[in-house]
Image (cartoon, helix red, strand yellow):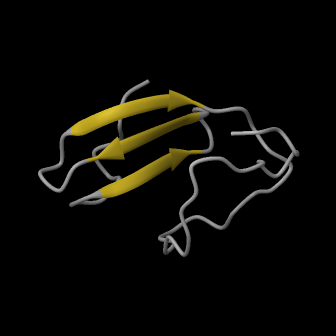
Amino acid sequence: MALSAESGSGERVVHALDDSGMWLVSAAGKVTRTFEVTPSTVSPERGSHAVTSRSSSVAGSGGVPI
């Protein structure tokens, strides 16, 4: 699983729907963590999305704790 060069710039969270992967990227553009993710029943639109809240423990769209 490799971060796409077209994923943007700066600090960000990148979710690759086709690769079932997620990357946390620092402001310097360095990948700090990677995760394999399980596909969901929800398909977000491609593009940029704002983070509107944070929590240490929540249920995913399928009801699975994450």
Q: Quadrant of the C terminus?
A: top right
| Percent coordinates x, y for residue 28 in the rendering | 11, 51
Q: Nearer the viewer, residue 51 or 29?
A: 51
Going by the image, does 57 lie left or right of 7? Answer: right
| Percent coordinates x, y for residue 25 in the rendering | 29, 46
Q: Residue 4 falls in which quadrant of the image?
A: top left
Q: Looking at the picture, does residue 9 appear above or below residue 64?
A: below
Going by the image, does 24 lie left or right of 44? Answer: left
Q: What residue is at 32 percent from the left and 52 percent from the top?
A: 6
Residue furthest to the left in view is 28
Q: Quadrant of the N terminus?
A: top left
Q: How many marks?
A: 0
Q: Looking at the picture, does residue 31 appear above or below residue 15?
A: above
Q: Looking at the picture, does residue 9 appear above or below residue 60?
A: below
| Percent coordinates x, y for residue 47 in the rendering | 51, 68
Q: Nearer the viewer, residue 40 or 59?
A: 59
Q: Looking at the picture, does residue 49 appear above or below residue 37?
A: below
Q: Nearer the viewer, residue 66 or 45?
A: 66
Q: What residue is at 56 percent from the left and 70 percent from the top?
A: 53
Q: What residue is at 77 percent from the left and 48 percent from the top?
A: 60
Q: Residue 21 falls in which quadrant of the image?
A: top right
Q: What residue is at 41 percent from the left and 40 percent from the top?
A: 23
